[in-house]
Image (cartoon, rainbow, N blue to C red):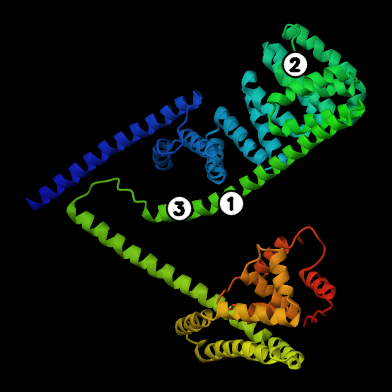
Amino acid sequence: MIARLCILILLLSVSCSSGNGRKEAERAEYALQHTQELYDRNALPDNDSLIMVAVDWYEKNGPERELALSYYYCGYIHYVCGMGDRAAEFYSKALVHAEKCGDGAALSMICNAIGYMYKHQNDNEEALAMFSRSADLLDSMGRYRSSFVPRYNEIEMLNLLERYDEALEQVNKASEIAEAVGDTSAILELAGMKAAIIVNDTAKQASVHEVIEDLSGIYAEYNAGKIPESHYGTVGILSFLDGDSRSARRYMTEGAAYSPDYLKVVLEHYLSLLEERAGNPYEALAHERKASELKDTLYEENKTSLIQAAERKYEHEYLQKSYDLLQSKHLYQVSALVMIILLSAGIFMAIFIFYRHKLKQQKKHTEEVMAYIDTIRSEYDEVNEKYESLREKFSKQSGVGEKMSKLLGKRMDSLRGLLEIASRYESRPALFYAKFKESVKVNSQYNRQWEDEIISITNLSYGNVIEELRSAHPDLTVHELCYCCFVCLGFSPQSIRVLYDHTNLNSIYTVRSKIRSKLGLVNSNKSLDSYFEDLLSSKGGSFVDMM
């Protein structure tokens, strides 16, 4: 009886699991199809909750094509939402599975999307390779009308890379295809691209008049003699190069009114040249200022974009780790006995993984501390020698010498204490790490007082040099000002790391780089030490030689 009951429970579990599997497959298929419909209507949502249903299912069950498309749409949603790193992750997965299934249409779409990613990262060579691959795939399938968009992108990349002959070759090939399939919009777009290439290639500006005549013929044949608005900027620049100031002023001015900022920069520059040639210096200056302002705006936007990308990257890494730990999937219903076994096994594995991770982390921290102690050992004699040198130097200054001796003496005692802990407990890593943390926790309570005192001593010794530095650069933190004090006193970067703030195991060179940036030395060949040497010399003081 008991055996029959167990068999019945197992059969019911299998039946429920099979039914759940069919429902999950239907949900995944619906999620993918509905997302495709929204994509075609350019109406995708601003989150991936729908398409992730398809991703989760097809990751486990396939097929490759549906998985590749699911990854692509998920990447596209993240890209539109500004999460470039997350989008790149899904695009890369989509590319792998599209290549496995050999679907040319899906592969072309994915390559074009990855090309845009590279383009926005200013990696033009990689972007060119992806756009070219996308267009060639569509051409090989006979989908010529669909291939024009990636082909435009390929030509744009060749133009940016100043490979003008290759760009013109692709324009001519694409123009022949556009004429063969009767795509008027493609013919006009390619004609404008050809003109833009000749504008950029100084070696071909001798034929500017011929280009204008060719464009006029194309406009007459395919656009009732009208110049498309998207061509105004190009036609204006060509007119300027051809000496037609009136047409140049008109078309460049109208083109700048609706062009994106990166094109406005070029048009404003040429308008400045036009007004300068026409003898209008004030108008020329006004256009040049607009171009400069646009350049500054683009630079700030690019900088902000890079900062936001970095913030999103680290935020995503943190959330992804949390997501991986919390995510659990229950796909099958089993009998009570099987559930108890699985639950017990899961608890055991979780405890095992947790303690293994904890041991690894403790081992890692202990190794970092030991490396730091080794640094103290190697640098201690040098720091001690410098300490004695400074004590002797300041002994003649009333009050300063005694204060400096007492201040640095406490820190030397702290370092000796760390060395003593290392000698006593280094054979027992766990106990050594605990003692080290206890020691540096106590010492960290005096860091702010230590900073204030070392700044006061340096000001007394060098005529308020740190106060003047604080006034000139208010963005410098107390921590960074204290570092500047040690540079003035002649300590090397390694000695400063050992002597100052040894609760922080990160590299002291990070602080040094921040100070250089705030002092405006990033693009200068002058070192931080040279900067302070000049600063002290200008005050009539002397720079303490480095060890």
* Near-viewer residue (462 or 334): 462
Q: Residues within 10 Å of mark 3 (few under 14, many from 20)?
A: few
**Mark 2 or mark 1, which is nearer to you?**
1
Q: Residues within 10 Å of mark 2 (few under 14, many from 20)?
A: few
Query: Horizontal and vertical percent for residue 152?
Result: 70, 26
The kind of secondary structure element at disc 2 is helix
* Near-viewer residue (226 or 57): 226
Residue 319 circle label? 3
**Mark 3 or mark 1, which is nearer to you?**
1
Could you tell me how many numbered marks the image carries? 3
The kind of secondary structure element at disc 1 is helix
Q: Residue at x 69, y 78 (%)?
A: 494
Query: Horizontal and vertical percent for residue 419?
Result: 57, 89
Q: Is residue 279 left or right of residue 159?
A: right
Q: Is residue 254 above or below residue 203?
A: above
Query: Horizontal and vertical percent for residue 278?
Result: 91, 25
Residue 180 circle label? none
The amino acid sitting under disc 2 is Glu
Q: Is residue 290 above or below residue 512?
A: above
Q: Are marks 3 and 1 in contact (CB under 8 Å)?
A: no
Residue 176 circle label? 2
Q: Tell me which corner region of the image, top left, top right, bottom left or bottom right, holds residue 353.
A: bottom left
The amino acid sitting under disc 3 is Leu
Q: Is residue 505 left or right of residue 232?
A: left
Counting residues from the N terminus, which is met first, the one under dot 2 or under dot 1? Answer: 2
Kindly identify which residue carries mark 1.
Answer: 310
Marks 3 and 1 sit apart, C-alpha to C-alpha, by 14 Å
Query: Horizontal and vertical percent for residue 268?
Result: 79, 31
Marks 3 and 2 sit apart, C-alpha to C-alpha, by 51 Å
Q: Is residue 269 left or right of residue 19?
A: right
